[in-house]
Amino acid sequence: MSKPIELSGSRQEELLREAVSRQMPLCLSYRPRDGGWMNVDSMFLGFDRSSGDLVVAAPAGPEHLAPEFVEGQSVGVAFRRAHRKCVFETSVTGRCFFAEDRGDDVPAIRLLWPTSVFELQRRLYYRTPLPPGMELPVEVWRWGADPEDSGFGQPLRGTMVDISAGGVSLALREQENPHWCNDTPVGCAFTAGLGGERIELYGHTRYLRPARDGQFRLGIQFLGLETDGDSRGLLEQVLKLTGEFQNVEMNRLAKA
């Protein structure tokens, strides 16, 4: 089973300086006021010479929709280097303007230099299907919906098709079809094994489409699982579950 790899101090500094020099794109994860997680695109810009903080571009968009990052706010950062994904958790130290080479001042955010940076290998995101003959019920609900709002707040019940560190796919019966649009914020929960601990995760829907068996397939992308230090235990539980599924399938094939 793959696990996040924590980089050494020298390797971490080398990686971040390379990301800044190449102004690599990145994704900022933050918690809006209504809870859950949101992802917005940004890019590395440079360093604050007085403090050594990282400087990244303030996410663009309509003013009424742009996230308001404030000093002390916790954020997650994810970016790709070659075939690996790098993530870290940090906090906002302030807002500023960054002077680009062509003379333009770009709205920017200062981020505290992270204490830890992790590399996530691509195989963490390989979808692991449930072994044949196994069924794992999953509850899913629209995040922030009023529980009294039938069809929106009441949990739907489906069965897991496959899972990875990046998300989960569910099979829903036709009568359970919620008719959600993509990017609907949802929560999902399941219990792995008898007496196992309930795992509750947050994400956004990525697809909802009919399947050949007459059911529907619901794809959910997990958010905050990689970049939030408090969620690292949940990530480990998901990786442990995928490892168990893989072992069951390998044992089955060996006996075939």
Image (cartoon, rainbow, N blue to C red):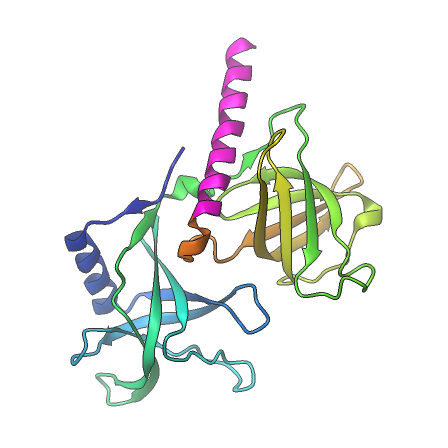
Q: Which image quadrant for residue 41?
A: bottom left
Q: x%, y% of residue 132?
A: 64, 24
Q: Which residues are magenta?
A: 233-256
State which quadrant residue 183 falls in.
bottom right
Q: Is residue 160 left or right of residue 108?
A: right
Image-based side of 1 in relation to 188, left or right: left
195, above or below 209, in the image: above
Q: Residue at x 57, y 67 (%)?
A: 35
Q: For residue 39: magenta?
A: no
Of residue 30 and residue 218, the one placed in the foreground of this image is: 30
Would you say 130 lies left or right of 61 here? Answer: right
Count up the numbered dots: 0
Q: Is residue 82 visible?
A: no
- Using the image, determine if residue 251 lies above or below residue 104: above
Q: Please identify the quadrant where the C terminus is shown.
A: top right
Give the camera-side residue of 210 and 107: 107
Q: Residue furthest top?
A: 255
Q: Quadrant of the N terminus?
A: top left
Q: Residue at x 54, y 28 (%)?
A: 245
Residue drawn at 81 percent across, 59 percent down: 151
The reply to whether residue 182 is in sight is: yes
Q: Residue 146, located in which quarter of the rendered image?
A: bottom right
In percent of width and height, residue 20 lies at 24, 68
